[in-house]
Image (cartoon, grey):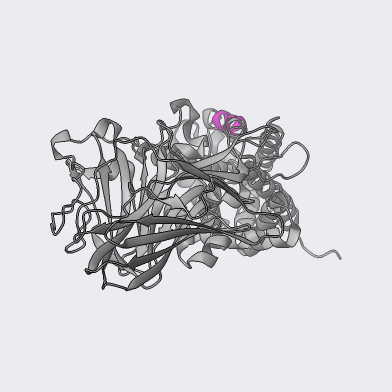
């Protein structure tokens, strides 16, 4: 096989795979029989232990029904990376603006709002306690107060951390202090909780955390497979023993009208909701065993989708107290930073079926970035490294191509001799290959290897937030966006054209040759809408391949063998 066919096969496979990914990605809002939609349970009564839909912790009371009362007062918390809005009802985080991540790379762009209680982008983080022994409980509808009565807190210059305590008290003597702890430069929110029983009777409760959102609208259909959000995973995910990492899209919450809740106990795990480049994850208290579940609230046509963790029972004798610390990651899928929080949290970076290749590619790309200080140059460097590693295979391919080129005149002579008798021509052609010891399939393996690497690197470039809006040089100021002036796609077209000129095409009829002549143009147009970082990779790969092909052709001469030494 020749280099032009390599481009053709890779183009077809890449397009087919990406179209398959888009076709496989379901619409975010499923259609399921409304009769099977679980209704939100009513608040628990004293001593009652009702069944808990999608929260199967043994003996736990039901979660409160969705509140109909207006929101309580809110509190604003500002750090160097966050602007949070906290609802005093439950100390729920109802807005999380990421101050270091603008939506677009231009002056005046709004920042990414990962959590938002707006009607169309509703997404909040909630936590609380349920009880079966008292009439009231500090759930996510209970109203807290700030310890000092302030409504705005800000991390001051020179201050490394900020703690904001909230307090809930009950007439029976039960109190809960919930403190949000934020650190400079960290997209991690500590949620420290201390329960105290100053009453005269024992208190029993179950801690829970949950994320609740309306699935985001799908991207425009015209965006196509060149828009990564068209097929980037959006849904819930969790990690824990024994099943490791699992995920479920919002569209798959229901199967046959039945909620597909995992309902499984997990220790020292995490659960969250994923989207392109960003993630919100609850990490329950260390050593805590929780039952993870998914459910919905409200009518299915406008349902809130939830993922929840419910802890086991905590019993407080009169005069006793209990403390726990949960953590909430609300931010980018920054792998190094997430690994510092939990060693498996980077699994939320979803590279799909090519993770086994994408993960080492990202590791190598990161090391090259650390060395060169620029993601664009790191992409060029990784091509050089890969080309060097694959050179022995490439050499066999180019040697085979040189031999094919050497016998091209004889192939043309056979075509003239046998005319339209394709069968006789094919037999004569194979005899010629056998006589000259040419294996026409010798170049296939080197051609197949770049295909999964190409697709894996595509996922690395579009899914790794580290490369989001990263500049290269000059006109390329965003490697995850298309080349604004189409310079790289045009250069890619030229490289493919020159490569084609050096490539023998034995056995092709005029129609096939004409079709192959248009391949650089077709592939060049397609590349015009891909992320510029991916086109940069492909241009660099093509330039090095062109240089290799020219050098190997010169090395093996016109006959496909080492030239004889000069006398």
Q: Residue at x 67, y 54 (%)?
A: 156
Residue 380 % position (x, y): 70, 52
- Magenta span dominant secondary structure: helix
Whether residue 1 is visible here, answered yes or no, is no
Query: Would residue 516 be counted in the magenta stretch?
Result: yes
Query: Would residue 460 be counted in the magenta stretch?
Result: no
Residue 429 % position (x, y): 51, 46
Q: Residue at x 67, y 34 (%)?
A: 483
Residue nearest the observer in this picture, 498 or 559: 498
Q: Against 190, is 301 above or below?
A: above
Residue nearest the observer in this picture, 116 or 502: 116
Q: Which residues are magenta?
A: 513-522
Q: Against 180, is 532 above or below?
A: above
Q: Residue at x 21, y 43 (%)?
A: 40
Residue nearest the observer in this picture, 46 or 231: 46
Q: Judge from the rendering whether residue 187 lies leftward or rightward of residue 217; answer left or right.
A: right
Q: Going by the picture, which residue comes out furthest to the top?
A: 222
Residue 528 % position (x, y): 62, 32
Q: Residue at x 66, y 49 (%)?
A: 541
């Amino acid at each position: 096989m020749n280099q032009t066919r390599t481009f053709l096969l890779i183009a077809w496979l890449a397009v087919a795979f990406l179209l398959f990914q888009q076709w496989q990605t379901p619409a975010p809002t499923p259609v399921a029989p409304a009769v099977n939609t679980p209704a939100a349970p009513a608040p628990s009564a004293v001593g009652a232990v009702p069944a808990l839909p999608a929260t199967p912790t043994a003996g736990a009371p039901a979660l409160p029904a969705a509140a109909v009362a207006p929101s309580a007062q809110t509190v604003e918390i500002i750090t160097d990376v966050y602007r949070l809005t906290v609802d005093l009802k439950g100390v729920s985080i109802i807005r999380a603006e990421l101050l270091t991540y603008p939506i677009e790379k231009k002056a005046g762009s709004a920042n990414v709002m990962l959590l938002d209680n707006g009607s169309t982008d509703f997404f909040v983080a909630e936590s609380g306690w349920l009880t079966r022994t008292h009439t009231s409980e500090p759930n996510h509808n209970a109203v807290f107060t700030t310890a000092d009565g302030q409504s705005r807190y800000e991390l001051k210059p020179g201050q490394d951390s900020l703690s904001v305590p909230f307090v809930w008290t009950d007439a029976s003597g039960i109190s809960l202090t919930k403190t949000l702890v934020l650190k400079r430069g960290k997209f991690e929110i500590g949620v420290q909780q201390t329960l105290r029983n100053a009453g005269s009777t024992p208190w029993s409760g179950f801690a829970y955390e949950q994320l609740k959102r309306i699935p985001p609208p799908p991207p425009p259909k015209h965006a196509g497979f060149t828009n990564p959000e068209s097929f980037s995973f959006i849904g819930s995910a969790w990690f824990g023993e024994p099943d490791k990492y699992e995920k479920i899209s919002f569209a798959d919450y229901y199967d046959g009208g039945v909620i597909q809740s995992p309902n499984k106990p997990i220790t020292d795990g995490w659960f969250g909701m994923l989207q392109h480049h960003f993630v919100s994850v609850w990490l329950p208290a260390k050593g805590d065993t929780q039952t993870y579940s998914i459910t919905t609230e409200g009518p299915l046509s406008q349902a809130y989708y939830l993922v929840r963790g419910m802890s086991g029972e905590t019993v407080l004798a009169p005069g006793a107290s209990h403390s726990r610390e949960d953590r909430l990651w609300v931010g980018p899928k920054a792998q190094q930073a997430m690994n510092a929080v939990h060693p498996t949290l980077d699994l939320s970076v979803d590279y799909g079926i090519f993770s086994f290749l994408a993960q080492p590619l990202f590791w190598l790309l990161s090391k090259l970035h650390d060395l060169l200080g620029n993601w664009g140059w790191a992409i060029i460097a990784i091509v050089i490294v890969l080309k060097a590693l694959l050179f022995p295979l490439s050499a066999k391919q180019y040697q085979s191509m040189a031999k094919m080129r050497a016998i091209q005149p004889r192939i043309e002579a056979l075509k003239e001799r046998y005319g339209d008798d394709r069968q006789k021509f094919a037999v004569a052609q194979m005899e010629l290959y056998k006589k000259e010891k040419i294996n026409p399939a010798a170049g296939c393996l080197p051609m197949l290897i770049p295909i999964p690497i190409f697709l894996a690197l595509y996922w690395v470039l579009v899914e790794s937030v580290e490369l989001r809006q990263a500049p290269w040089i000059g006109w390329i100021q965003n490697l995850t966006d298309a080349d604004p002036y189409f310079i790289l796609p045009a250069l890619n077209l030229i490289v493919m054209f020159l490569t084609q000129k050096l490539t023998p095409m034995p056995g092709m009829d005029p129609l096939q040759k004409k079709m192959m002549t248009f391949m650089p143009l077709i592939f060049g147009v397609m590349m015009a809408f891909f992320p510029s970082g991916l086109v940069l990779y492909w241009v660099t790969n093509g330039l090095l391949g062109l240089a290799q092909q020219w050098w190997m052709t010169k090395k093996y001469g016109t006959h496909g063998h080492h030239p004889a030494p000069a006398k």
